[in-house]
């Protein structure tokens, strides 16, 4: 029992170490993927990654946000209605999405789509010796494969988060317009009054952390795969589960940190 | 015949000295030494688990041995800096067993990749170089195809085209004929001979296909349990009296341990009953 706990602790610590080294090396290589200053071919790869990680996730993120926005509005309205305060649903939805839901819905959707896709792609490259081939040619696999993905995720996750927030709040408007005939003008005024720039900025910072976790956990799980096709399957599952778990833990840590620093106090 | 006593009149392009590798206490390579001369084709033979791949990965600089040295064109791979290693790597082209073609790139783009990444040549020149190499391996018409659209033999040819894209001095081929039918494999043998005759390249072929090794190689070397047990021309090799070489040449099965032999015998008896 104790031995098992110890083993898990050691392997978790080793994973954290692997992730940290991988993160550091990819950060060093990130400039190579930037437009203008970097290598144009890496930037083009990064653009393709933005399409794969970001653009193609647009529909699912928008739909999830709209549904969860509607759910949140219905749940809040069920309580607020009893006090005749249904219009405060606006404030609730606006704050919930700008502070929290936009970033976490996006991260969970992207984790499900892209952590697994990255793990599958990288593990296939391991099995088919493509990473060996890169190294033999004197090309750095981190710069060639990881850095463009990381850059793509760093750029697209904040955009998706803003989009998710927009659709969540739009769901709140759809509900209020249908239930108490709130006009768009009133809704927008109320919503803008409750959105704070600081909340938006902190949420976007969180989305950068989530992007880091998703790409790096996916890459690490992909590299770890050895053996046959069923190992690829296990690797992709581990990537999604671990990335989603770490995203939620990081969300807790970041939110607690902001709270302690007093950055999340209203007004 | 020992491996160290061959007279080295010509320049040794690759010089392997006392290379040893152990994984978790098990010796995979035991003090292997060998010279490979410019312009010769050397076939490295050996069964599964004989250390072929382990040695190959050391020679192409993917990993470093525990001890010993590997000199390529005068640079010691085991002691040089990353920058020196990068220079040496440009003299070596490798075609991996799994072909290792990038699946998101066409055959053209795969072959062009090392040229585009490692030189500043203009696009028309790159295209010309790529076309030349694809023509040489017989894939001039397949440039626009993706790796998934290629047959097994075409993949190997494409991998060779990429390996020779930068006109390397040395080409290393890992199991080029594995999984191919005899006719396609014979075609690949012709291609390997052409690398030597047409381009003057030095070729190291890792294989377990005897007939292919005898057809193409100037010299054949055999690894057994991490040691080089025989080196010589194909004729010398065929005439070797080393029991393991004879076993390999004649295709006899590995002798089972007594216990499992007893099991096999009793199983067969039951089977026939």
Image (tube, coloured by chain):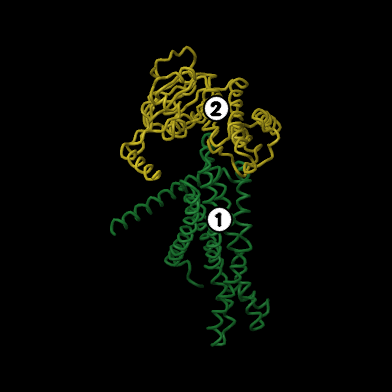
Quadrant containing the N terminus of chain B in the rendered view: top left
Which one is in front, B140 or A6? B140
Q: Which of the chains is yellow?
A: B
Residue at horizontal 61 percent and vertical 53 percent from the top: A50
Circle 1 sits in a helix, a strand or a loop, which is it?
A: helix
Residue A40 in sight: no
Labels 1, 2: front one = 2
Circle 2 sits in a helix, a strand or a loop, which is it?
A: strand
Q: Which colour is chain A painted?
A: green
Q: Where is residue B43 shown, x and y percent of the image?
A: 50, 25
Which residue in the protein does label 1 denote? A114
What residue occupies the far left of the structure in this picture? Answer: A2
Which one is in front, A189 or B12? B12
Q: Is residue B245 above or below residue A60?
A: above
Quadrant containing the C terminus of chain B in the rendered view: top left
Tally the numbered discs.
2
Residue B159 left/right relative to B3: right
Which one is in front, A55 or B163? B163
Residue B15 in sight: yes
* Mark 1 touches mark 2? (CB < 8 Å): no
Which residue in the protein does label 2 denote? B171
Check the residue under mark 2 and report the chain it is in.
Answer: B
Do the residues at discs 1 and 2 belong to one chain? no
Residue at horizontal 36 percent and vertical 33 percent from the top: B255
Which labelled disc corresponds to residue B37?
A: none
Q: Is residue B75 above or below residue A117?
A: above
Label 1 crowding class (10 Å Cα cut-off): few <14, some 14-19, many 20+? many
Check the residue under mark 1 and report the chain it is in.
Answer: A
Label 2 crowding class (10 Å Cα cut-off): few <14, some 14-19, many 20+? many
> Mark 1 and mark 2: span between their CA atoms?
37 Å
Residue B46: quarter of image: top left
Q: Where is residue B222 shown, x and y percent of the image?
A: 43, 25
């Amino acid at each position: 029992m104790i031995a098992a706990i110890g083993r898990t602790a050691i392997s978790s610590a080793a994973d954290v170490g692997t992730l940290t080294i991988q993160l550091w090396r990819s950060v060093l290589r990130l400039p190579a993927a930037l437009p203008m200053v970097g290598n144009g071919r890496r930037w083009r790869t990064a653009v393709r990654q933005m399409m794969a990680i970001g653009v193609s996730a647009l529909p699912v993120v928008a739909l999830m946000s709209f549904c969860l926005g509607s759910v949140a509005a219905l749940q809040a309205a069920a309580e607020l209605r009893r006090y005749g305060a249904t219009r405060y649903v606006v404030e609730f939805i606006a704050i919930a999405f700008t502070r929290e839901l936009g970033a976490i819905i996006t991260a969970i959707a992207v984790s499900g789509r892209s952590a697994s896709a990255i793990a599958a792609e990288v593990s296939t490259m391991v099995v088919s010796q493509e990473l060996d081939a890169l190294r033999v040619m004197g090309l750095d696999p981190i710069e060639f494969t990881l850095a463009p993905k990381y850059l793509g995720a760093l750029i697209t996750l904040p955009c998706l988060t803003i989009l998710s927030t927009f659709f969540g709040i739009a769901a709140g408007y759809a509900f209020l317009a249908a239930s108490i005939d709130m006009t768009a003008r009133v809704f927008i005024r109320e919503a803008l009054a409750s959105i704070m720039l600081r909340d938006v900025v902190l949420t976007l910072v969180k989305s950068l952390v989530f992007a880091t976790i998703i790409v790096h956990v996916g890459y690490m799980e992909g590299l770890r795969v050895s053996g046959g096709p069923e190992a690829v399957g296990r690797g992709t599952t581990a990537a999604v589960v671990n990335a989603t778990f770490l995203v939620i833990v990081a969300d807790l840590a970041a939110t607690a940190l902001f709270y302690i620093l007093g950055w999340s106090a209203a007004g | 015949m020992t491996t160290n006593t061959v007279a080295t009149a010509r320049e040794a392009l690759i010089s392997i000295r006392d290379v040893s590798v152990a994984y978790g206490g098990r010796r995979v390579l035991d003090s292997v030494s060998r010279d490979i001369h410019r312009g010769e084709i050397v076939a490295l033979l050996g069964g599964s688990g004989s250390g072929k791949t382990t040695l190959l990965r050391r020679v192409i600089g993917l990993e470093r041995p525990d001890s010993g040295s590997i000199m390529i064109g005068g640079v010691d791979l085991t002691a040089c800096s990353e920058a020196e290693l990068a220079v040496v790597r440009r003299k070596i082209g490798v075609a991996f067993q799994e072909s290792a073609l990038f699946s998101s790139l066409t055959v053209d783009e795969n072959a062009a990749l090392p040229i585009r990444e490692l030189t500043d040549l203009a696009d028309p020149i790159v295209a010309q170089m790529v076309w030349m190499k694809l023509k040489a391996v017989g894939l001039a018409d397949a440039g626009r195809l993706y790796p998934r659209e290629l047959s097994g033999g075409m993949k190997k040819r494409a991998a060779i085209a990429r390996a020779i894209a930068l006109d390397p001095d040395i080409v290393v081929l890992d199991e080029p004929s594995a999984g191919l039918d005899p006719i396609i494999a014979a075609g690949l043998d012709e291609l390997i001979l052409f690398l030597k005759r047409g381009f003057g390249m030095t070729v190291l072929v890792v294989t377990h296909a005897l007939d292919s090794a005898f057809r193409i190689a100037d010299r054949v070397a055999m690894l057994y349990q991490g040691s080089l047990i025989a080196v010589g021309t194909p004729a010398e090799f065929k005439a070797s009296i080393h029991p393991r070489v004879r076993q390999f040449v004649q295709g006899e099965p590995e002798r089972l341990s007594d216990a499992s032999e007893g099991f096999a015998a009793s199983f067969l008896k039951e089977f026939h009953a």
